[in-house]
Amino acid sequence: MAVLFDPFRELDRVAASVRDAQQGPRLMPIDLFRDGDTYVLNADLPGVDPGSIDVDVDGRVLTVRAERTPRSREGVKWMASERPSGSFYRQFTLSDGIATESISANYDNGVLSVTIPVTERAKPRKVEVQTSETVQAVSA
């Protein structure tokens, strides 16, 4: 089996690794959805040490930080190294209708799930529509 050497591909790979090393914290891919009276934020963080995950609420800002340590093996010649290591960082602005004191987080199988409950006053409610007949019956 012949292996072709492409110097341009190799140059792109080296340039990308240098560029990645100079960048700051990486963004983590997320899903955010509302399920009834809670929002659920799922962030993909495979291979991250659970002890490095930090979920912080400061006022109306939710911050998620995590760290994936670089893979280092002496004497190994890497053929490909595409899984990023380093810091992961994401911030979200919360609305006034969020119960910030009840936010919880769980890390399982490489996915961080943050549950963000809605306050009672922000939950949908039904407003009764009155007519002139209803107003007269109430005042009588």
Image (cartoon, helix red, strand yellow):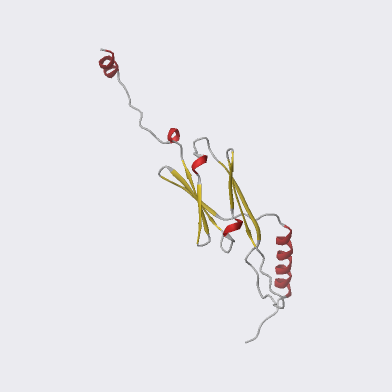
**Quadrant in which the C terminus is drawn:** top left
Q: At which x and y percent is residue 90?
A: 61, 50
**Quadrant in which the N terminus is drawn:** bottom right
Q: Residue furthest front?
A: 51
Q: At which x and y percent is residue 15?
A: 74, 65
Q: At which x and y percent is residue 130?
A: 31, 22
Q: Is residue 112 left or right of residue 74?
A: left
Q: Is residue 55 left or right of residue 116?
A: right
Give whichever of 70, 132 is nearer the camera.
70
Give whichever of 50, 31 is nearer the camera.
50
Which residue is at a point 64% across and 67% down the rendered structure image?
82
Vertical placement of 49 versus 98: above or below? below
Vertical placement of 11 versus 110: above or below? below
Vertical placement of 29 versus 4: above or below? above
Q: Quadrant of residue 124?
A: top left
Disc tally is 0
Q: Residue furthest top?
A: 140
Give whichever of 134, 56 is nearer the camera.
56
Q: Is residue 122 left or right of residue 20?
A: left
Which residue is at a point 58% across and 64% down the rendered structure image?
47
Q: At which x and y percent is residue 121?
A: 44, 32
Which residue is at a point 73% across and 68% down the rendered structure image?
14
Which residue is at a point 62% across and 66% down the rendered structure image?
83
